[in-house]
Image: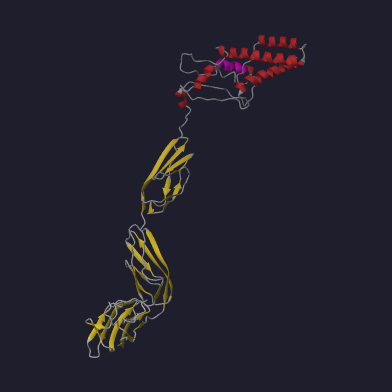
Amino acid sequence: MGKEIKNIENLFKSSFEGHKVEPSEKLWNNINTKLKFNKYISSKVVSSIAIIATVAILSVFVSNVFNSEKNSLTNVSPSGSQYTIEQSNQESQSTNNQSAKYPISETSKIIQLKKNSESVVLRKSENVRATDLAPVIVSKSIKVLSYSNVDTLSKLNIKPTPPPSLKFTVKCKEGCVPFELELENLTKSAIAFEWSFGDGQTSTKITPSYTYRYPGVYTVVLKAVGFGGVAVSYIDSVIVHDLPVALVQWPYESTIQTGQKIMIPNKSENISEVEWNFGDNNFSDEINGKHIFNKEGEYSIVLKVKTKNDCIDSAVINNIKVINAKGKIVFPNAFTPNLDGASSGYYSITDKHNDIFYPKANIKVSNFKIRIFSKAGIEVFKSTDILYGWNGYYQNRLLPEGVYIYIAAGEFEGGQKFHNKGDITILHRK
């Protein structure tokens, strides 16, 4: 029996440790009577009755603790906006007297709540469980931390969490299409991000990469969400410039000759500067590409154009073959005019008739001139078009058979010049 009483004493001390309140003598007598009665009951029934008795005792004790003004914690009048629980002096003295009989752990601490005008201290035994303190937390004491008690909460020195500290940088804010935006996100205390690039596109990445495909002026906005709220930062005037358009027109065959002058028309748009690279270590800043290749080889000609904002575009002419070949021109030594009347003088190189006198050249000829004289020195024909030959007539009259003198001059493509002099014989076909 003494051992069971000791266990109950320990139960009270572990359950109400920190309040230093001992049950009355009458209560102990009731417990002893119940224990004697339980001696004759089976062990399982004894355990059940003991548990029921313990719950009943706890209920009585809790009621006594909170209804007694002398031996319990004092309450403020319910008419007030709050309730404050303090440890009374009388209880402190009673506790000191009881501590000798029921010693309390040195680590135990006292729960103390004071009015709003004072600091609030909440302390409990390091070894006390949450369920052990359940009898102390009553409905009135809960109002101490109610939402309506704003002043009391302010005494807890709870500082509001600030919004995220926004910071991001852009390496370059101006460029040409396609313009890649280089960002660095240095924001702190954020849990989510939303980027807006000013052209309708967005991203939720921490540090996104983005490329502008069209020219314009854009505003970059960063919105960051944190536990303290939402912060917004932006960078305006991200300028994206349009590109020039490089266009060239190659007017020649894929093969040209050394010494041949070339001129490449420049059809580019939106340009302010031009640079030609002819592939043979020769360059030019003229609008149109003018050049003469002096060495054989295969070359690529590059045109690079630039705008006033330093935006660049280029065009390339590939596989230009330059050969070292001299121009040749050959004049026939006789021809047979049409006896039925003068022809126009224009000819075709595929024509099989020999009724027009004209030269044949292996390359293009420019600045062509030819004059034909009789033996008497009379000029009977002249032309500046290599495709227009002599038909053997002079002033619409067929000239007699015989030998006539010609003088020809011109320039081959590439700049090579020629001067020829010879004689031509007119023959009449029978």
Query: Percent x, y for residue 130?
Result: 60, 24
Residue drawn at x 64%, y 22% is: 104
**Residue 234: in sight, yes or no?**
yes
Query: Percent x, y for residue 260?
Result: 36, 76
Query: Percent x, y for residue 229?
Result: 44, 35
Task: Out of 218 and 7, give the one closest to the viewer.
Answer: 218
382 horizontally vs 13: left or right? left
Tell me where the magenta segment starts and ends, as one range.
89-97
Q: In which quadrant of the rendered view does residue 41 lie?
A: top right
Outermost residue, front side = 430
36 horizontally vs 165: left or right? right
Query: Percent x, y for residue 328?
Result: 37, 82
**Residue 102: in sight, yes or no?**
no
Relative to residue 172, is residue 54 depicted above or below?
above
305 horizontally vs 92: left or right? left
Q: How is the image coloured?
A: secondary structure
Of the 4 image quadrants, the one containing the N terminus is top right
Task: Out of 149 and 11, give the one closest to the viewer.
Answer: 149
- The prevailing secondary structure element of the residues shown in magenta is helix
Q: Is residue 38 magenta?
A: no
Q: How many marks?
A: 0
Q: Is residue 91 magenta?
A: yes
Q: In which quadrant of the rendered view does residue 334 lie?
A: bottom left
Q: In which quadrant of the rendered view does residue 52 lie?
A: top right
Of the 4 image quadrants, the one containing the C terminus is bottom left
Task: Out of 127 and 89, give the one closest to the viewer.
Answer: 127
